[in-house]
Amino acid sequence: MIRFERVSKRYPNGREALSELSFGVEQGEMVFLTGRSGAGKSSVLKLIALLERPTRGLVVVNGENTAKLPLRRVPLFRRHIGIVLQDHQLLMDRPVFDNVALPLIVADTSFKEIDRRVRAALDQVGLLGKERVAPIELSAGEQQRVGIARAIVSKPPLLVADEPTGNLDATLAGEVMGLFRRFNEVGVTVVVATHAQHLVQASGCRQIALGDGRLI
Amino acid sequence: MASLSNWIARHGQALISSGGHLARHGFATALTVIVMGLALALPLALDLLVRNARGATGDFSDAVGMSVYLKPQVTEQTARQLAQNLSGHAGVANVTLITATQGLEELRTQSGFGAALDALSDNPLPNVLAIRPAADASSPAQLELLRRAVEAWPEVDSVQLDRDWLLRFDAILDLMRHMLWITATLLAAGVIAVVGNTIRLEIRSRSAEIEVTQLVGGSRAFVRRPFLYTGVLYGLIAGGIAWGIVAAARAALAPSAARLAAAYGQRFLLEGPSACELGWLALAGIVLGWIGAALASAHEIARSGPGRG
């Protein structure tokens, strides 16, 4: 599902975030990217979601060599990846329904289908009935779950999450991890970047530990 | 079929959401469309001015004629013959012969130089033919043609158009018509700039939304769509405003124009903007609004590519 081969990433400011990194993630697998902040976790996720391109090396996602993907095909490529960020990037002036529906709207899904799938996604994250609520009225944990519902609403085969529990207390963090486990159980490949070691150990999943942009 | 109705629904939704956005920001919208409306109204007003002026002088054309001064040695007999020939000429309604004797008589009674004229040994005045052109041949160009033809006759000394000012006025109108095109072009560029700048600010204020949309796989076309519709709506509203401005100006000017026409003994209606012009203004507004929005969004919205997504 994901293959990194000798990938280096150097940012314009000269900082080398990744150096000669190689790893793979199988289809249907759930893995954790761990390491201190600055270890390169976010860079790996950005390369997977094509928010960045590698300076050197090969990144293959969903069978696509990301280096060869023309810009105009990037939107289509992203529709097959669910992305969850620490600051969940919700549109605060739109109700929950509109936020979750966004990936379906950009993909020209019919209204009937949108209605059905948004409710299904909200049901999965335990927020059914909050469609008309503004995100600002929700708790931090609920907001993060809206972000997760948005990431899974179009049923992507791959879900990547960058510090999804960063702003949550232990109980809420456990709930969110439970959600990811459940998606993984139905076949979704899941990559979660986190520094919450206890959650990783509790899950029993494989972890890819990064330090200074290399495997450790 | 399903995808077509889906497409229509998508675009309808973008249109409605753009309209809603404009309505929610009523004051900003009003400022923009008023500036655009004024810019669109000016060329139309100028066009109507030229057309009305042309219409008015067309009405006055039956007051236009020309005087043909024959050479002194031409006899009254020959003059009568020439008048006869001229009556048959195309574009001539009728010809009146004012003989030298009649002319002198007129001068004697009207000028008060009676005694001085009596002192002359013989009549210094030539025979004159007064030509009234046909109604369908009274344009300045046609009159000029007739004047040249008559002037070429050997018996003719000179020809004077009674209304030389008409020619000049026509030249002025021509100049104004050309100015109209220059003005319209400049103002169209102005409209594009106003829309472009407004849309640019709007894109900036909605950058978070654009970023999220691109993150979840929204194409550039999708992101640009509501802004293009916003530009089109601006143009459409501005077109309506421009028409309203010109129609109101016409209504305000109609009474004084009627008084002016009455002073010339004419019945003259000030022509106003028609429904057809409303359509053209709306179309111009839509096209210009779209161009402005397209330029601004092409410039402001980066492709959702790596490093910019």
Image (spheres, grey):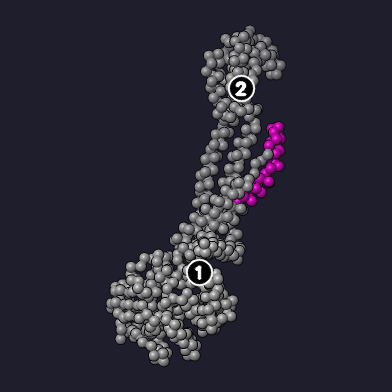
**What span is in magenta?**
B242-268
Answer whether residue B267 is magenta in the image: yes
For label 1, the SS is loop
Tell me where residue A164 sits by quadrant: bottom left
Depicted B80 relative to depicted B249: above or below: above
Residue annotated with mark 1? A109
Answer whether residue B224 is magenta in the image: no
Where does the image place residue B15, in percent across and percent down from the top left? 56, 62
In terms of depth relative to the viewer, which is nearer, B120 or B75?
B75
Residue annotated with mark 2? B92
Residue at x 53%, y 68% (from the top left corner): A110
Q: Chain of mark 2?
A: B
Tell me where residue B92 sits by quadrant: top right
Depicted B150 relative to depicted A40: above or below: above
Dominant SS of magenta comes to: helix
Depicted B183 relative to depicted B125: above or below: below
In terms of depth relative to the viewer, which is nearer, A204 or A57?
A204
Q: Chain of mark 1?
A: A
Closer to us: mark 2 or mark 1? 1
Structural crowding at the residue carrying mark 2, measured as other residues with C-alpha within 10 Å and reported as few (<14), some (14–19) or many (≥20): many
- Verify CB contact (< 8 Å) between mark 2 and mark 1: no
- Residue type (three-letter) at the residue carrying disc 2: Val
For label 2, the SS is strand
In terms of depth relative to the viewer, which is nearer, A42 or B6?
B6
Where does the image place residue A27, in percent across and percent down from the top left? 37, 80
